[in-house]
Amino acid sequence: MSLIGPSRHQNGQKSGARRAENNRIYAHPLPLVFSTPCSSFAASLLSLLGFSAARLENPHCEGIYDPATRSVWVTNEKDSTLLWRRGFFGKGDLSRSEPSWLARQVNARKAAGKYMTSEEMRENRRAERKQFKLDRAAAIARAAAEAEAAFAEGREAAPAVIPSGATWKPSSSEASTLPAPPEEEDDEGPDADDAEPEEEPLENIEHLQLTLQEAWFLVWNLDCLTVLDPHTNEPLTLQQIWRAFQDVHCVPPSLSIYANRIDNPFLVNYAAYHYYRALGWVVKGGIKFCVDYLLYKRGPVFHHAEFAIVVIPVYEDPADQESSPFSLPNVNTFSWTWLSTVNRVNSQVQKTLILTYVTIPARSRISPELLSSPACLTHYSVRDVVLRRFVPARMRD
């Protein structure tokens, strides 16, 4: 029996319409948008003088800081949609990436949904792959049985037909022949009201979850996010956010050994995040592929990630590493076995591994006042090294 129903075949026209719709929805790479007013005499005069009449629209979203999960929660549905569609910031806490829990629940209530969310598409692909493997194993078993029977009878075996991944299509014959459930008789007779009871409206309980690096980028660079205190629900100042995002890595934060540490994990990871975001890449978490970040050219909606980033901290002053209270990952020399494993994992999914070396400046050349402010981020330097897996049989040319 087939594990899935008939696949939805979409021709080139529908695919083109979907691409056009995605280009319209995700047209803006950042939450800030420059809006051009309607043409007028004043706008034309300003353009002649070399000035622009465009206005900067700032959405001013709000999020609640949650130290337990080391993230910022955006609970307003409008703000969540805006941050995702303009730069792909955050992820839905009940979804794989895009906050689509409500859409999935609404789609599940419909007998025949007109669209599929990204999570449903993923599950459909997994079911297709599983069904293909079952069909291929069954075909191989039939071919082997036929070969044995032909050998026993002294005849030539018929050519075996083994399904190929390029030509295999899921069968819908068995799914379409399933018996329909029996109709239940109404005790009140045929004249009774057969109207179905109205379903209760769904409440969207999903929120957008921003990493600390994403939240700080929106706060410090774009000034489009207001972070609220989880206890008082009051807006936090920039200095309070700066300290709070670092204190989550300090247990307890009151210890003097954590004061003004230039190698705080938040600072090291943000230096790498900011480096690639400033170059126009969409940066997302890469824990699924054993790396720190994934780089998308436009976003998860358009293409798969092309590059996988492993952040490697490098101390400018070895004395800072010896006195550090933090245990930064990859700061010590890692084995070739680990590196080969990560490289092979990402090569199998068509991703290029990049080793990103973040140089931590020496504390001796930075003043305490500079260490306590975001200005210290300018002293970090980032270098990236592309690592490719060498396959002799494929790379002779």
Image: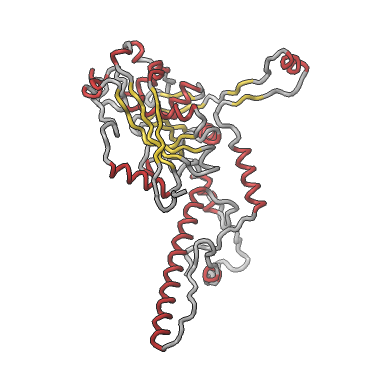
- Using residue 201 as the reference point, say whether residue 319 is left or right of it: left
Residue sitting farthest toward the front: 397
- x, y percent for residue 15: 62, 50
The one nearer the camera, 262 or 228, is 262
Residue sitting farthest toward the left: 322
- x, y percent for residue 142: 43, 76
Residue 279 at least partly seen: yes
The one nearer the camera, 114 or 298, is 298
- Up the image or down, 9 lies above or below 337; here it is below
- x, y percent for residue 253: 27, 22
| Residue drawn at point x = 53 percent, y = 24 percent | 60
- Up the image or down, 282 lies above or below 9; here it is above
Quadrant of residue 43 in the image?
top right
Quadrant of residue 133 in the image?
bottom left
| Residue drawn at point x = 60 percent, y = 38 percent | 25
- x, y percent for residue 125: 49, 56
| Residue drawn at point x = 60 percent, y = 61 percent | 194
